[in-house]
Amino acid sequence: MQVYYTFCFLAAISVFLGFLNQYVLRAQATIAITAGALALSLVVLGLGKLGIVELRSWADQLLPLLNLEDLLLKGMLGFLLFAGSLHIDLLALRNQRLEIGLLAVVGTLISTFAVGALLYWFLQQVGMPVAFVYCLLFGALISPTDPIAVLAIIKSLKAPEQVSIQVEGESLFNDGFGIVIFAVIYALAFEGGEPTLPAVAHLFALEAIGGVVLGLAIGGLFHWLICSTNDHSLELLLTLVIPTAGFSLANVLGVSGALAMVVSGIIIGNFTRETGFSRVSQHELDNFWTITEDFLNGLLFLLVGLFLITIDLQPFDYLIMGAGIIIVLLGRSIAVTVPFTVLKRFRRYHPYTERILIWGGLRGGLALALAMSIPAGHAMVQGQDLRHLWVVMTYGVVVFSIVVQGSTIAPLIRRSRGIAEPETKPEAGS
């Protein structure tokens, strides 16, 4: 019951912070809740150092009980991705499939190696010789843009449609490929595995292709079930089964639950919405999943902010957090610029496309959960646990991307809305 009580109290805090935000900060809810949780963490740490109220030990005991890694990767992620993909326009996604594919696959791979190489060079300069494979591991976990963080902020700002679809589509699909890269490098770093082409192809087929196939099967099944009933309550309950039992089934089968939820959500949102739901039911569907998404987003980003309490920061940690932010931004710039250098030969894009994609490449709880999956004490660098260094660096990047990038991208998007969308050239063969 202690875990349940902790979950309930934290959920109440996230709702309360959202309530205060509409009267005080009036910022985007995700940013406000994360900033509020950071402020709360600093207050807790400050009171403890002053000897007024010692809450650090209490927080150290309770927060790990929730296990952010399992809570997000094996639970909340399914709900959030399904809810986000319900509103994806399949026709618009199809028109941007080349851009989304290159950003999600090629861009993630480029970013992984760019971040890994820059991090390796930086650590060599400060006298911390870390094996290149560990630097690549950090590049793999930080390169995929977090669909939860991106969708929570970009959707509310009404970016130009072309750019919005690219940002949302990339963030929804690149985590599947990013997790494959992370799994391969993880095996090489900690399990002594060999990254042979057949092994990588098998892992990709199992994770990515398996997730897509399962998503198609789940989406098709529940499309038929929903279209077979006129009971409004049952229709909503059937959609609830997808991110619960469907996501759990993906985890049991060892395929990408994230991709399965995205694919099934697109099917329900584009086909079932029109043929299986009445006008009243469509409104109920949107309201139900919007409320669910807002509630879970608030809780997740509260946990991200409160995670600061559990980190024992040392002076060197602030240096690597700052370096990590710069390195990840450089890696993101390269990952976006390289594909668009090729794409601009064939299509015209909004003038703000690359700037919004670079600055809107937010990271969130997904990267933090992957960093926490690194085994503690397995790799030591000059007396410091590599896991601690990577978690600290990831946390710095996540907080910066949500609070700083998330709060400063709004003026960029507002300026972009004043420029007409270019008409894209038709693709060859279409």
Image: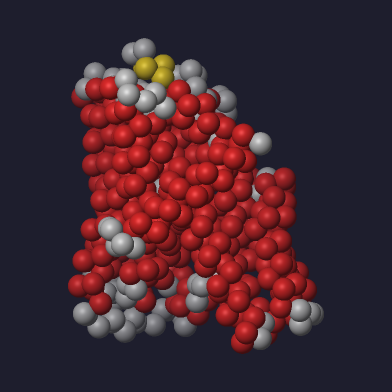
User: Does residue 249 appear in this view?
Assistant: yes
The x and y percentages for residue 216 are: 67, 66
Residue drawn at (26%, 61%), measured in percent from left and top? 409
Relative to 264, 406 lies left or right: left
Q: In front here: 168 or 153?
A: 153
The x and y percentages for residue 331 are: 30, 46
Residue drawn at (52%, 67%), measured in percent from left and top? 290
Q: In front here: 415 or 301?
A: 301
Q: In front here: 159 or 107?
A: 159
Snapshot quadrant of residue 42? top left
User: Does residue 342 appear in this view?
Assistant: no
Residue drawn at (24%, 35%), measured in percent from left and top? 323
Question: Is residue 7 positioned above or below 154 on the image?
Answer: above
The x and y percentages for residue 205 are: 63, 51
Question: Is residue 174 positioned above or below 43 on the image?
Answer: below
Relative to 230, 64 lies left or right: left
Q: In front here: 235 or 117?
A: 235
Snapshot quadrant of residue 229? bottom right
Relative to 116, 290 lies left or right: right
